[in-house]
Amino acid sequence: MTTHYRQLTQAQRYQIESGLACGMSQVRVAKQLGVHPATISREVRRNGGTHPYKADAATKKSDARRASAGKFCKPRAWLKAHLPLWLEQGFSPEQIAQRLKLEQPDQAVSHEWIYRFIDVDKRADGLLYLHLRHRRKRYRKRYGSHDRRGQLCNRVSITERPVEAETRERLGDWEGDTVHGVGGNLVTLVDRKSGYLSAYPVKRRTRRQVTRAINLQFKGHVVHTLTLDNGKEFAGHEHIALKSGCQVYFADPYASCQRGTNENTNGLLRQYFPKGSDFSKLTVAAVNRVVAKINLRPRKRLGWKTPYEVYAGVSVALMS
């Protein structure tokens, strides 16, 4: 039978004080209390001081020690080496912990453990905490302002989108949008089922440049549907449908929640390209490097797989 260690109670400390004052040995006191002799020895050594053991003073000393003690953070060489790399890739502590369970269950730790590890590093003047994604975009409610962008010709409402796209049953149902910067823009596409992201830089949000960017990104990909907002930059939707062989649908005006996958993924892009960033010299290669990081980030809704793994049907060792 395994005996679990428990803190001594105040009543037990009074019994220790009384027994020792009567000249009883520590072994006899332990037997009387039903604890191991080492428990009495440790209690007297740590909380008794140089004076005769006093229960009240011992309790105060024990309580003070417990209040000032920090959580134990077991140092692991492999985690110390890899944690900064994973955090730099944009992984959250929860993503790291859950992915470790999948790839290296014998080395798994909880996300609380990782947060404590980062906190210990911070107290030692480390910089791991700087990689935590703690800044969130503040929600700004829209009050149904007048839509001045004009009407797109031959637009098909999202209400007519097939149920397969709604339920994320298949790959190839995409959502599209643009991300704005100083001197340039990104045209973004996200697969609804996998969360797989594609992005392409354009100088201006014209119909011609945006249409070309979408057609370039769709090359080599399965495309069943594409859901867009009502921006006039998407006026070339019929050419996109003809080129890729898909059906294009449009969300209701100012209903970003109908394209939630794309909106949320654009938020991840903003971690690397904050509002006000200079896009004037942004290259395709630079955008692809950021996109690759996002596509290799584990997602909770995917069972902690990455968008790339789900979209490509492969497994990637992220924790090695």
Image (tube, rainbow, N blue to C red):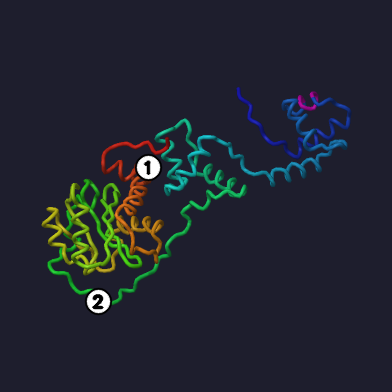
Residue of label 2? 148
Q: In the shown orientation, is residue 249 left or right of residue 129?
A: left
Residue nearer the viewer, 291 or 231:
291
Left or right, 63 with respect to 310, comes to right
Position of the N terminus by quadrant: top right
| CA gap, disc 1 and disc 2 | 41 Å
x then y, percent, for residue 174:
23, 53
Depth check: 63 or 314 in front? 314
**Residue drawn at (66%, 31%) of the image:** 5
Q: Earlier in the sequence, mark 1 or mark 2?
A: 2
Residue 319 x/y as whole percent: 42, 37
In reply to whether residue 29 is colored magenta, the answer given is: yes
Q: Which mark is residue 233?
A: none
Q: Which residues are magenta?
A: 27-31
At label 2, which amino acid type do we have? Answer: Arg
Callout 2 environment at 10 Å: few (<14), some (14 to 19), or many (20+)? few
Q: State the residue at coordinates (25%, 67%).
A: 205
Quarter residue 320 falls in: top left
Secondary structure predominantly adopted by residues drawn in magenta: helix
Categorize mark 1 by other alpha carbons within 10 Å: few (<14), some (14-19), many (20+): some
Please state which amino acid type lies under the numbered disc 1. Answer: Trp
Find out whether residue 228 is within the magenta segment.
Answer: no
Is 189 placed above or below 22 here? below
Residue hosting label 1: 304
